[in-house]
Image (cartoon, rainbow, N blue to C red):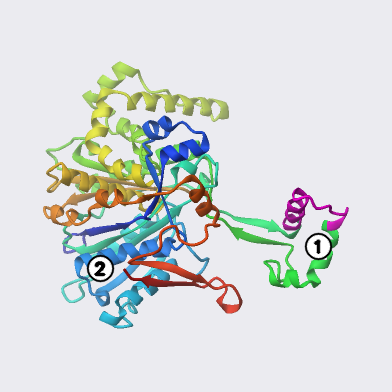
């Protein structure tokens, strides 16, 4: 984004932290009796990052910010804003960003003062997977208003644990990690112009509701477990226990301690409809792309000499990737809309025929049939020579790291950005001055489309990441360890924390109940 004096603002550097543990998708396929070929060749999944016992949203975010501070020699006193995008918050009121600040103060307080982060504005931003993109845009606006006297420096943090229920249809897309973006004027990596296409539609494609648990269900489950263990239970026991519990010490110590008959609980695992969410993703990105195109034309973003489609003007396209091949499957819709009046599309229609026409009525069955026909048409587009070449040159590099980590929720679009830059550096590609298209999505649902111009200094920044080298040094876990970590029954860390922040305690009673304590564990 740029302010009134047209000073460029954007991303100066990116850091990412991922757990040391991962599960190989071959082992996962064997555990679930799944087709490894479908997971690997069909969805692009090779491994999923799994947090250890001492890791959570806060530790992963803090580790990423620490990388950014150390690599760029930042004085914490100069960081005026640290906004966190997450859908894996650790508390219903206290921002997870405050836990990150606590850890960073422990790490840098002796050198820069115990109040080195005291004037840093922090907050959590939540809109499913697009929360970090929202944090980016608001931080860009804030930095753009700085001047030579007030040279603002901001950090956008993203951190999530993408966790799904065991044996659910989303389990294979799990992943975890944290990251941080350094936002400055005159960025060395990517300038972000002030033009954003948006699409927001309230839907229930993926969400994490507060579930209700009744005292009756808790007692019934306890009795059922006892019966399964061979104990005999008298008739009417549940009703007698419920009547007695309000006066019992058991109730006073439990979650029903104030006489409630039911309480709300939160679970990390979402409620979701995969196919419906894919349709919402396609629709939202297409609508946001249309909005971006209109705004860009009004701002005279298009060179009068260059009337190519935007998706041709963008050298690389960076997408939100809940699984590695998501963009490959979802982008044909935008590809079609951006080329409808071009000779290329005429050639594709000669191969495939015209797209299915939408029904004239609102008949649900007709709409469902049309959506099914459109899904088939999009798959046909993705198999054309033209689209395969387009995907290989503009999108494919972004999915390489996703294949090895899995879903990072709010961070997946920035992981794709890092993956693209590091792959291009390794292949000695010239991105100087190139325009990148950015497409973010968050269930619920919202999409944002924007773009970035690559700085001529991008190589010096990317050379310090070593993303794929670090990914190669992780530790694989077995099936039992994976399920123990998922269920929260793993006793002690699989790999003892070393040179990292670690969760060391969670308060369990009184005013300390639920309070999380962290500590730096030195090498």
Alpha-carbon distance for marks 1 and 2?
55 Å
Q: Which residue is mark 2?
A: 69
Q: Residue at x 19, y 57 (%)?
A: 464
Residue 38's x, y, as percent?
42, 31
Q: Which residue is mark 1?
A: 242
Residue 359 visible from this viewpoint: no
Q: Residue at x 31, y 41 (%)?
A: 399
Q: Is residue 253 above or below residue 404?
A: below
Q: Is residue 154 left or right of residue 28?
A: left
- The magenta segment is 217-237
**Most common SS among magenta residues:** helix
463 and 132: which one is in front? Answer: 463
Q: Is residue 230 left or right of residue 326?
A: right
Q: Quadrant of residue 107?
A: bottom left
Residue 344's x, y, as percent?
23, 24
Number of residues whose C-alpha sits closer than 10 Å to that of mark 2, classed few (under 14), some (14–19) or many (20 or more): many
Residue 380's x, y, as percent?
36, 23
Task: Give the total of numbered labels.
Answer: 2
What numbered label is drawn on residue 167? none
248 and 275: which one is in front? Answer: 248
Q: Quadrant of residue 54?
A: bottom left
Q: Is residue 292 above or below residue 120?
A: above
């Amino acid at each position: 984004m740029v302010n009134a004096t047209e000073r460029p603002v954007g991303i100066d550097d990116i850091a990412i932290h991922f757990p040391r543990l991962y599960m190989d998708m071959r082992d996962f396929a064997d555990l679930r009796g799944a087709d490894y070929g479908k997971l690997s060749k069909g969805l692009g999944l090779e491994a999923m990052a799994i947090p250890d016992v001492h890791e959570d949203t806060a530790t992963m975010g803090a580790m990423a910010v620490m990388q950014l501070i150390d690599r760029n020699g930042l004085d914490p006193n100069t960081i005026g804003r640290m906004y966190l995008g997450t859908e894996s918050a650790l508390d219903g009121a206290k921002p997870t960003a405050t836990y990150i600040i606590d850890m960073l103060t422990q790490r840098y307080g002796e050198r820069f003062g115990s109040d080195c982060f005291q004037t840093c504005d922090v907050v959590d931003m939540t809109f499913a997977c697009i929360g970090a993109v929202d944090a980016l845009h608001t931080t860009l606006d804030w930095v753009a208003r700085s001047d030579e006297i007030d040279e603002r420096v901001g950090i956008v943090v993203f951190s999530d644990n993408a966790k799904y229920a065991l044996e659910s249809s989303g389990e294979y897309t799990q992943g975890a990690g944290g990251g941080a973006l350094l936002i400055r004027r005159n960025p060395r990596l990517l300038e972000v112009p002030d033009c954003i296409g948006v699409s927001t539609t309230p839907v229930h494609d993926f969400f994490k509701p507060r579930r209700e648990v009744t005292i009756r269900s808790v007692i019934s489950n306890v009795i059922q477990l006892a019966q399964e263990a061979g104990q005999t239970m008298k008739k009417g026991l549940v009703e007698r226990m419920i009547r007695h519990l309000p006066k019992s010490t058991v109730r006073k110590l439990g979650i029903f301690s104030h006489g409630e008959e039911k309480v709300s609980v939160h679970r990390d695992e979402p409620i979701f409809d995969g196919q419906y969410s894919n349709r919402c993703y396609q629709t939202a990105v297409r609508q946001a792309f249309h909005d971006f195109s209109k705004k860009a034309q009004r701002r005279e973003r298009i060179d009068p000499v260059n009337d190519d489609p935007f998706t041709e003007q963008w050298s690389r396209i960076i997408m939100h990737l809940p699984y590695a091949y998501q963009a490959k499957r979802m982008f044909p819709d935008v590809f079609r809309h951006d080329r409808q009046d071009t000779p290329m599309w005429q050639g594709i229609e000669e191969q495939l025929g015209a797209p299915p026409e939408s029904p004239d009525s609102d008949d649900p069955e007709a709409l469902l049939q049309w959506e099914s026909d459109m899904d088939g048409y999009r798959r046909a587009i993705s198999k054309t020579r033209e689209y395969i070449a387009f995907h290989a040159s503009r999108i494919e590099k972004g999915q390489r790291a996703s294949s090895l980590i899995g879903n990072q929720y709010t961070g997946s679009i920035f992981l794709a950005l890092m993956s693209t830059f590091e792959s291009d550096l390794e292949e000695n590609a010239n991105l100087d001055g190139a325009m990148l298209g950015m497409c973010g999505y968050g269930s619920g649902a919202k999409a944002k489309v924007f773009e970035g111009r690559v700085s001529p200094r991008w190589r010096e920044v990317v050379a310090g990441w070593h993303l794929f080298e670090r990914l190669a040094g992780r530790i694989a876990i077995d099936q039992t360890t994976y399920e123990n970590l998922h269920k929260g029954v793993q006793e002690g860390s699989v790999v003892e924390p070393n040179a990292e922040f670690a969760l060391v305690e969670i308060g369990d009673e009184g005013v300390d109940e639920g309070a999380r304590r962290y500590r730096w564990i030195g090498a």
